Image (cartoon, grey):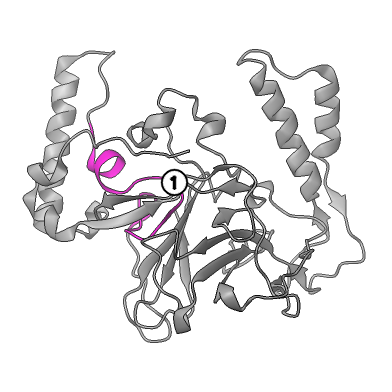
Amino acid sequence: MTRTTPPRPLDVEALFPELAAHRGTTTRLHPRPGTPEVSQSSVGGPMPWPGDEPWPVCTEAHGRGRGRRIEDIRRERQVRAAARARGPYAGLAEDERQLLETLERAHRVPEMSDTDPLPMLGVAQFYRRDLPDLPAGPDGCDLLQLFWCPFDAHGPTRYGMLLHLRRRNSAEVADVLAEPPRPPVVGYAGYVPEPCVLHPEQVSTYPFAGLLPEHLCARIDAWEEALEEAAEEADDDCAAEPPGYQYDLSIPPGWRVGGFASWHRTDPSPMDCRACAAPMHLLLTVDTSEWDGGSQSWAPVEEQGVPVRPVAEPTAVVVGNHGELNVFACPTDPGHPHRWSVQ
């Protein structure tokens, strides 16, 4: 089924003609529950992985012998979904409560040491033929595959993510691995994606305001302040919030490929390639939700008025504090290492 972004509440280029020079495009992925095939772009679907090629593993030293089982996490989601389907006030039945207590328990894997190779989770894959804003990979690779460690135990804080991205030529994968390895337990349920098919849609987008020329950013700030003051003077509790550049006019929420990164939780941080120092471009955004109360205007036309949960959270992926993951790639050489930021 098609997913269509509604027209923006205002024509931002009519308000600020200078923005035309900064306009870009991004491909909203609109993942929705389904049964993707190995030959499809997907979140949480099967991947064409050569049977003779080692599956990505995490080898960094951290605890990995205690966590939840993937099958328990998915069963818990099914139970909660069934309860929601009965109505907003139905709640859980007693047998469901008892089942959830069992499913939510952590399990120990005593034979695993902190340095044993830990299979990463296959999160998503993207074919260039499906996504107009997905840049070419090295040597003409047409497929991008995303993996991550199922534990928040990395980086300087030891509470960060560890990603692995693999580019490949899909036509060269002949003998597909039938049963990819899985970690015996995971440290964070939000890292376990539900299988989703994609409904790609290319839309216009504009940079984060703080990265625009200073004079233009100041004009946008003054315009938003004027709208807020007018709304306060109107003193209408039923009036809708005035549109804002960040939440309504520039960068769409949700999973997407290409475009511009949002820096709404931190100040913008330079993302330069560590191999050649070139400014990196946004490759991919993994978002906890496709819209929320502050970004309702981006809800697809086909899903206007539906509850945010579960429709706007189809993948069940949770990034950070219900935020988003931005992955950056080098525009000079796509084979250079990626960088990422959590917002």
Name above or below for residue 323 compared with residue 50.
above
* Residue 135 shows in the view: yes
Magenta highlight: main SS: loop
Residue 162 point in image, percent of width and height: 60, 66
Which residue in the protein does label 1 denote?
254
Most distant residue in the bottom direction: 276
Three-letter code, disc 1: Gly
Residue 260 part of the magenta-drawn span: yes
Q: Which of 168 and 245 is in front in this view?
A: 168
Name above or below for residue 300 compared with residue 332.
above
Residue at the (81%, 73%) spot, across then down: 116
Residue 132 point in image, percent of width and height: 37, 61
Most distant residue in the right direction: 111
What is the span of residues highlighted in magenta in the rendered image? 243-267
Residue at the (77%, 38%) spot, across then down: 75
Q: Is residue 18 left or right of residue 324?
A: left
Q: Is residue 293 left or right of residue 13?
A: right
| SS type, badge 1 | loop
Residue 316 point in image, percent of width and height: 61, 43
Residue at the (46%, 46%) spot, across then down: 199
Few, some or many residues within 10 Å of mark 1 (<14, 14–19, 20+): many
Q: In this view, does 66 lie to the left or right of 316?
A: right
Q: Nearer the viewer, residue 116 or 25?
A: 25
Residue 99 point in image, percent of width and height: 85, 30
